[in-house]
Amino acid sequence: MTVSNGRFTDSERQGVYRAIFERRDVRSQFLPDPIPPDVLTRLLEAAHHAPSVGFMQPWDFIVIESRDVRETVLALFEQENHKAAERFEGERKEHYRSLKLQGIMESPLNLCITCDRSRGGPHVLGRNSIVETDLFSTCLAVQNLWLAARAEGIGVGWVSILDQAQLSTALNLPEHVYPLAYLCLGYVSEFLDQPELEAQGWRSRLPLSGAPGMARSALTGAVPGGGASG
């Protein structure tokens, strides 16, 4: 129950912040248990209630259960992951190769959140100057789903090491639809205390104060933020 003026109760507010701080990019902890249809519906409803510029709501959700499709996407990942590893040298390359960066086959469900770049017609309120706001809006749908999933005890992993054109072909997407986020979803054995890349020593979370850019932001009064992927 909320209190006056639309404010959350203390427990409700704590739940929101808990979801934010305990959200993780899950790759290794998936359980085989299926996600019940009503729970999946709640997650998609949460994503669908994300804010969007001009209320264009450019997102669509493709639920992927087919093993054949997943194997195709996994092959695309492995191809791109090999190329990504070649960008590093020495111990850094070996460290990269040791990282678990996807859970395509292990998770009980894959989900692709797409952006229909024609949604709303050629002139969308608020999009004239920054045409990428449709992509930004779709990212907000991803975040809504991710936080709702954490509240449901469901892990989410974003597979970003994919060629988007090849992924579009694999999913038979029309030209004007962009596959923004390929996600792995499922219940997990645990949520790690730290983001996995931090726990594996790849990167550490930047402090809110004293982060790179502090001197520049001091001129404008902005507060810098930072964070490792996880």
Image (spheres, rainbow, N blue to C red):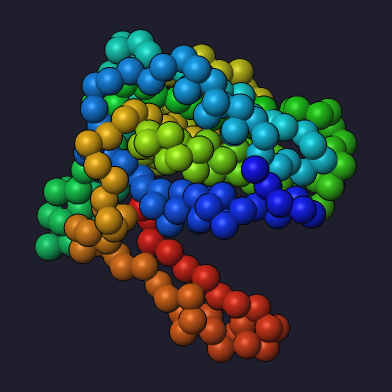
Q: Can residue 79 be seen in this view?
A: no
Q: Is the residue 195 above or below the residue 111 in the image? A: below
Q: Can residue 170 be seen in this view?
A: yes
Q: Is the residue 221 above or below the residue 203 in the image? A: below
The number of numbered badges drawn on the structure is 0
Quadrant where the image shows the N terminus: top right
Query: On the image, which quarter does residue 101 sit in?
Result: top left
Q: Give the percent coordinates (x, y) of residue 153.
A: 37, 36
Q: Is the residue 136 above or below the residue 155 in the image? A: below
Task: State the residue in front, 206 or 101.
Answer: 206
Task: State the residue in front, 43 or 25.
Answer: 43
Q: Give the percent coordinates (x, y) of residue 221.
A: 68, 83
Task: State the residue in front, 89 or 66.
Answer: 66
Relative horizontal placement of residue 147, taking residue 91 as reference (left or right): right
Relative horizontal placement of residue 96, taking residue 80 as reference (left or right): left
Query: On the image, which quarter does residue 177 sit in?
Result: top right
Residue drawn at x 46%, y 15% as measured from the top left:
37
Query: On the image, which quarter does residue 173 sit in?
Result: top right
Q: Give the percent coordinates (x, y) of residue 128.
A: 84, 47
Q: Is the residue 133 above or below the residue 32 in the image? A: below
Residue drawn at x 65%, y 52% as measured from the top left:
8
Residue drawn at x 24%, y 21% as measured from the top left:
32
Task: State the residue in front, 74 or 53.
Answer: 53
Residue drawn at x 47%, y 68% as measured from the top left:
226
Q: Give the percent coordinates (x, y) of residue 162.
A: 39, 36
